[in-house]
Structure formats: structure tokens, C-alpha cells
Image: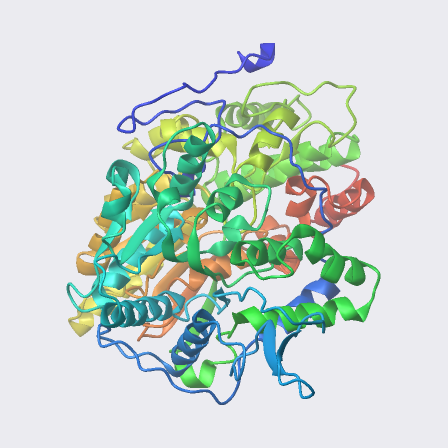
Amino acid sequence: MLLRHDCFLQQPDSFDDSVTYFNPHCLTRAADDDSMPTWDRVEAEQDTPAENLSVVEKSKVAELLDSASGPMVYRDIQVSEMLQVSLKKHQRKALAMMVEKESGILRGAEFPSVWTEETVVETGGLRFLNNITGARVYRKPKACLGGLIADDMGLGKTLTTLALIAGSVTTHNNTTQTAARATTLIVAPLSTLTGWQEQIQSHLKAGALRFTVYHGSQRRKSVDLLRSFDIVLTTYQTVRAEHLQTLGGGQSAIHKVPWHRIVLDEAHVIQNRSSKNFQAVYSLQARHRWCLTGTPIQNRLEDLGSLVEFLRVDPVDSPGAFRRLFLDPISRQDPSGWERLRALIKSISVRRTKESLKNELGLPARQEEVCKVSLDDEERRAYDLVKRRFALAIDSGGSKMSAFQLILRLRQICNHGVALLPPDLREWINQASRFGPQIPLQIETCLSCGRVQDDDVDDGVLFESLSCGHQVCPVCRRMAKLDSQDSTGEPSCPCCRAEDLTGRGREGIRSAGDSPAYRPSSKVRELLRNLDHDRHEAAAAGVPPEKSVIFSIWTGMLDLIGTALTVRGIEFQRLDGTKTHEQRCDALRCFRSDDNCGVLLASIGSAAVGLNLTVASRVHIIEPGWNPMLEQQALQRVHRLGQTKIVKQIRYVVDGADSVERYILKRQEWKLGLIDASVGGFTRSQEDVACLLEGMRLELGIDAAL
């Protein structure tokens, strides 16, 4: 109501840290949900929008990144005795690189470096060669005392970093008489904070390093107290919130500490240099800076530029220099731009993939299975009605956003019939079953603020659909676009956030699940059949059943699966954006240690990054998504270093010639594909979108004459 009259609730000037605030007009991310929301969302982007990489350019970037594997021969590093686990060969190599970078050595370096120290033969003096530009200077340059660890996910970047910290603490204690410690600040998404704590406790000897968490109610620590620890763990949102306090004249302990080292986990979080995340971490003081991310370049070369700027890679750490040396030549098809970029990447980073290390890693096999699901009669009736409505939306020249919304609804019907659909669509299906799909269906409404799209607005200009399927107006879309982004680069959704925090929007789903008459869908019945098979096999062998992780895009689907598991007597834990840090810790602890808890329910958005779930060996992907990378990230939470069992992945797909899920599987090679058309501000032309929709109609076997 307020939004319809252009009225917005404002944030308070001050607030109590112990109280959770929820302002529906200010966005926060469920996956990065600190105790305080972020208030400063609606502001103009300062940078000129950059072009996304083409398919050819992405292939070139992948080749450049993979070239940064480091030298074949290098001096091995003595690993600190604080570690109680052995490092694998590739981890020792990364550790050697990190130690060399932090030493600042410019002559005789074994790993590629930005600068090389030379002796001038004629004078015996020194000069310094820039290995990126080829320029030579006679004044000693500022060395980059850090770098980028870009190893594939699941290869042990966390353990390697802990080995570096342990080694530097040992060296500092042996060479320094002062009480001050060489403190490392680790900034991570909330979802990975638990993993850091667990790895510190499991990989280091008890009491070897002092660490603390600077987050939520544990933030009230002085500068002197923070400097008394070896490791301080915090989140991006905490750093961002405290940075905002300093801009307003307030105090921030973490911005006052001269850190020995800063480590950014999932560093692609700062890929947008105009974002508050980037500005907040850039303002921190440190001698050494490290970025950990398996995706340093996601969609734009500027992604790497932000990391380079944070790392202080002189002389290419300004936006102007990065554009002049790399972006402009590449845009002109000048090969020198790519060659300089190759030199830069090799000079500051090391990257290995699971594929390149498969012989060394010895990971157990991964089996993939597609479980074909047939809709029952009731689900089929609902599916056919919405499918015919999709055809009518195309034939009548209606909004393409309407068509995308109907595609979303087809996917939800594949999961659980009408149970996931909004109440108005359920009612429409009831009426359409009697009177036909031609009856009006109003879906041109912003699901965040309730604003209705005007009939005289051109298709796709006013309303857009986010990847979660919610349709929003330009104001809400702009807020979502400016909000902090998750690891996939997709914006958070105001509708999902409101539902997660308040429970609004899923009452119908919960009531359906809580009803004594609840009946699992065809897809859930197949899931239960597979879980029962594992339980029966384990019972026959006299061992606990294999643990399973069940991933779904929709938290509403997790509600329904949870009900089915409860009815079946299967104990489970759950991870999604509604969980606090403490609740996530408790859920993971129970899943890992309790033999009676055999299932973890997880939303792909909240569990695709930063989790180690090797205690499980079964992965159930409930529905195919447009972006296959999300599914791969979720799978690699289980199939990674530390896994000792064969991992079985089961994907549930509704079968049939007219299955929208089969169509999605065919199109998953488009990394963003259709979803770019609705999420990326129509990066495809309207003609392309029309072709895609027409292609879907042909795939679904819809007669244009319907």
C-alpha cells in the first residue's frame, strides 16, 4: 500500500544490536544474514555497465586462468608443526607460492611475479622490470605482498591458508619480542564461517592458534583484544556495516587494526568495485592481502580488476590503468591485451582444477543417474491447463513476462502439483478445469509491492522475473539489482527475502504440508522410494544408511519434502536462508555426527557455496535449473577432498515429450540462457526472447492453433 503511493519506510538513525530489524523496503540477503540488515540499497551505480564476456572470450579466460598452475620445480616449504594433517602436493605448492609472495622477493623468484629485479651491467645498479607491461624503472616498486588462490572448489584452499597462517605465527613468535601477534583477518560469507571454525579446530593442534568470531553479538571487542588473537573471523556484511559507521563518524574496531594479513574467502563477492562490499574491505589496513575464489572472473573482465585493486597490484590496481592495459586493447581485438592479462594472472595467482589433478587427488568415482518421473492424473490436468495457457499467452501477443511466469508454474507443477502455486493460480486452475484456459488470468502484478502493469506498456519493459520466478516492477528490480549478490552473480529477491524472514507467501504450502490429508507428489514419491532403497540395503548389511543431501531451488518444496520425511519417520536437518549462524552450525553438527539423522534438506542458493558435506554420499537434485553451474557447485559440496565413498547423484526429471524439465536439461549448456532474458535486464533482444519462447512451444508439443 505504501509503495503504491511512493511512500517508503526509512531506517532508524540508531538501533540495538541485540534486536533483529526487518524493513520490507530495505533489502538484505538471506545467505548473508548478519544480525543487522543493510540499509543503503537504493543508489545509482557509478560505473558504466560493462559488456558480458562472449562464449569465445569465456573460453579464452578459462585458458588463461588454467595457465597459472605455477612452476614444475620449486623449493618445498617446511609446514608448521601446528598442523595435525598432511598437505597434499598441490596444497604444498600453493603454500610455497604464498610464502614467496609475502616475502616480497623480486630477484630469483620461483613463481612468476609482477616485478623482477635486474642488475644494470654498465653501472652495477639496480633496475626493475615490469613483467606485465615490459617497462623498466630504477626506483624500487611497491611489491604485491599477497595474491590470488584460484583453485577449483573443494581442493583445500582453506587448509592451505591455515598452513600459511600457522607458519607465519611460528616465525613471528620466534623473531619478535613484542606481545602483539601477527593477526590475520578472514572475511567470509556467513555460510562459510562455520567451515572455517571447524577446519581450525580439526586441522590445527588444540590451542595452537587463538581465534575469535567477530560477528553479531560477538562484535563488542576492542582493538587491543582483537590484536591478541592469531585469527579473527568475520563476515562481509559485518565489515560493510562497520564501514558505514565510520563514514557516519562512528567507530569500527576492525577498521582500526593494522592487520598482518587479510584473507577474503569467496572473494568474487567484491567483483563490483562500486559495491559496498568492495569499498568496505578495500578500506581495511593490512600488510598482506589474499583472495580465495574458484571464479575470479565470472561474467566480466572487470571482475578481476576489482580483485587486483584490493590486492594493491601496482601499477595496474586503478580502474583507469586496468582499462588502458587490458580492457581497451581486448575490445579492439588487439592480442596484446590478452597477453598482458595472461602475464598478470600468472604473476599474482595459482590455479588448479579437479580435472588437472585427478590422478593426484584419487577422488572416488561419481555416478550420475536421472530418475524419470511420471505425473499422476491430477498433476497432469493442472500441467496441461497451464501449458495451454502458455500457448494462449504466446498466440495472443501477450507479455513475454507472462509466458515466463507460466513456464515457472509448469516447473512447480512438475515438483508438487498445485501445492507450490500461489492461491490465485490454484483458483484459476479450478475454474479453468470447468470453463477452459481462456478465462482471464492476471499475473502482471509486482509480487513485491503489488503494483499492476499498465496495459499500454511495451512487453518486458516494466516487469521482469528474477531467477527465483518472482515478477517485480522496475523499482523493486532496481533494489534487487543493487543489492549484494550471491556467488552466482545473481541478485537477491525482495519477495524471497520477505518470505524467509516472515514466513509470508508460503502459508498455503505449509498448510498443505501440515494437513493430515497431505499426499506426496509423484516426484516426492520417487525420492522416498530411493531413500527407502538405501535404508533397506543398509539394514541388510547391518550398517547405517548412506547420508543424503536433498537440494531444491524452492524453500516451499523443502517444506513439503520435510513433511513427507516426517510422516515416513526419517530424521533430517535443514539449511536455507532463514537459518541463523548458530542454527546452521547446529544443523550441520547434527547431520555429521548423528547416525540417526540421515538427510539434509538444503536450498541450492544457501548451500552451493562454502560447505563441506563429505559425510554424505548421496545427492538428490529435485529439479533441473537454468544455470547448471549452481547444480555443479551443490554437488561439489559432497564430491570433494575428504570424500572416501562413491558419490551417487540422482536428478529428478518429469518425463514425457512435453516436459518443461526435459527442455531445461537440453538448454542447460546455456550458462544463463533464458534466465538471462528475464534476470539480466534483457541482455538478449526481444526478437531472441520471442524465438526462445517459440522454441519452447515446439519442444513442448504445443499446437499454435490452440
Q: Position of residue 321 (x, y in %)?
A: 70, 56
Q: Is residue 93 left or right of residue 615?
A: right
In this view of the protein, which residue sits in the foreground, 135 or 76? 135
Q: How is the image coloured?
A: rainbow
Where is 236 relative to 457, above or below?
below
In this view of the protein, which residue sits in the foreground, 433 or 548? 548
Where is 115 relative to 392, above or below?
below
Q: Which residue in the rendered view is the most extreme toward the front?
A: 123
Can residue 576 be spotted in the picture?
A: no
Q: Which residue in the rendered view is the most extreme toward the top?
A: 5
Residue for point 49% across, 55% down: 267
Instruction: Give the quadrant of the C terminus.
Output: top right
Can residue 230 be spotted in the picture?
A: yes
Where is 274 relative to 72, above or below?
above
Q: Position of residue 142 (x, y in %)?
A: 55, 64
In this view of the protein, which residue sits in the foreground, 517 or 267? 267
Q: Is residue 374 left or right of residue 234?
A: right
Residue for point 76% across, 30% down: 459
Q: Position of residue 188 (x, y in %)?
A: 39, 51
In this view of the protein, which residue sits in the foreground, 478 or 213? 213
Q: Position of residue 151 (x, y in %)?
A: 48, 69
Question: Quadrant of the rendered structure where residue 118 is?
Answer: bottom right
Q: Is residue 236 left or right of residue 612?
A: right
Residue for point 35% across, 39% down: 559
